[in-house]
Image: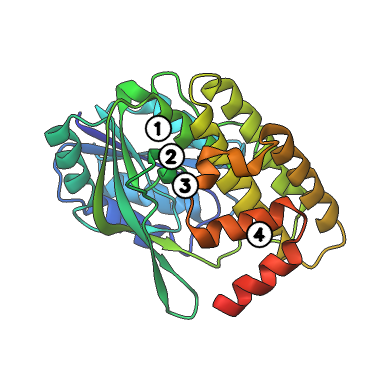
Amino acid sequence: MKLSIVIPAYNVQETLKECLDSVLGQTLDDFEVIVINDGSTDATEEMLSDYAERNPGRLYYQTVENGGQGRARNIGMELAKGEYIGFTDSDDWIEPDMFEKLLRLAEDEGSDIAVCDVLAHFPDGTTEMERNWREDRVMGAVGHPNNKLFRRELLRDIRFPEEKLWYEDAEFTAIAIHRAKKISHLAEPLYHYRRGLPSTMNNSNAEKNLDILTVMQHLEDELLPDARDDFEFLVLNHVLLDAVKRVQAMDVPEKKQVIWLMREYVKDKIPHLGRCRSFQEETRNRRLIMKLHYDGLQDLAAALLKLRA
């Protein structure tokens, strides 16, 4: 088996058909689709049963007690037979040739991971390109696992955290990228991602954003001491920049305390921001926002970002 595509599914009856049709319509021949129904209470299981009956030998599903997306993906990986593993979320969809192109790229270049771009779709019909790639820094690809193809051997002992953490994707992809010997990028938006839908990352639970600190602790154990520069890059971009910005946009009383805890964490790991190589290599605008967040001036940072929008 050349490829296994793992899909976690939880109460996605409205979007599941589009997802499965796009995955089953891949231009490859030698692949399997493994869907883990994570305790859905809507019509998801009935739909999966119908798809499995109509696609014997191609699509398999297993229903498990609800345990979160990370656990569902891990179960799917354990069942996978493919030489390569890809992931798709059940509320997204992919181009028909996505995995054929990524597989060809990985095999041609001998890559452990092949990455494509993402096209985000908003409820108002607008779209936005998300490259999720930096030529100067492979850790810039940390985030989505769904726009990537992984050599199965690379993932032999890498799993998603199962504590129902936010930012679980960042932990999984960071470890995989750190251990990969070669990563290739295809500058085409082959993965389609729905933005603005209700999700774990799209609500007003400010304190849950502190999960990023747990993830960073896991990554510290993985990356240090050999890859300190990569670790500091992740702290700056995923804690100081993105997580602080996300919490600052919330209208909840606890956000100041949450941001303070994030700042204290960053200052503990990077006590001299100006001397940090990863900070020095960022663009002028990103350095400005990071510095304002570092100094507790997130209100000013938010105002500046609003002016530039």
Q: Nearer the viewer, residue 160 or 28?
A: 160
Percent coordinates x, y for residue 10 in the rendering: 54, 49
Three-letter code for the amino acid on which mark 1 is drawn: Ile
Three-letter code for the amino acid on which mark 2 is drawn: Met
Percent coordinates x, y for residue 122 in the rendering: 47, 72
2 or 3: tag closer to the N-terminus: 2
Q: Residues within 10 Å of mark 2 (few under 14, many from 20)?
A: many
Q: CA distance from mark 4 to mark 3?
A: 20 Å
Q: CA distance from mark 2 to mark 1?
A: 7 Å
Going 69% across and 61% down the picture, which residue do you hit?
A: 203
Q: Nearer the viewer, mark 4 or mark 3?
A: 3
Examine the image and state in which quarter residue 181 appears.
top left
Residue 177 has which mark?
1
Vertical comparison of 128 with 108: above or below: below
Q: CA distance from mark 1 to mark 4?
A: 25 Å
Q: Is residue 230 rendered to the left or right of residue 221?
A: left
Are the two marked residues, 1 and 3, in contact with CB atoms closer than 8 angstroms? no
Q: Nearer the viewer, mark 2 or mark 3?
A: 3
2 or 1: tag closer to the N-terminus: 2
- The residue under label 4 is 245
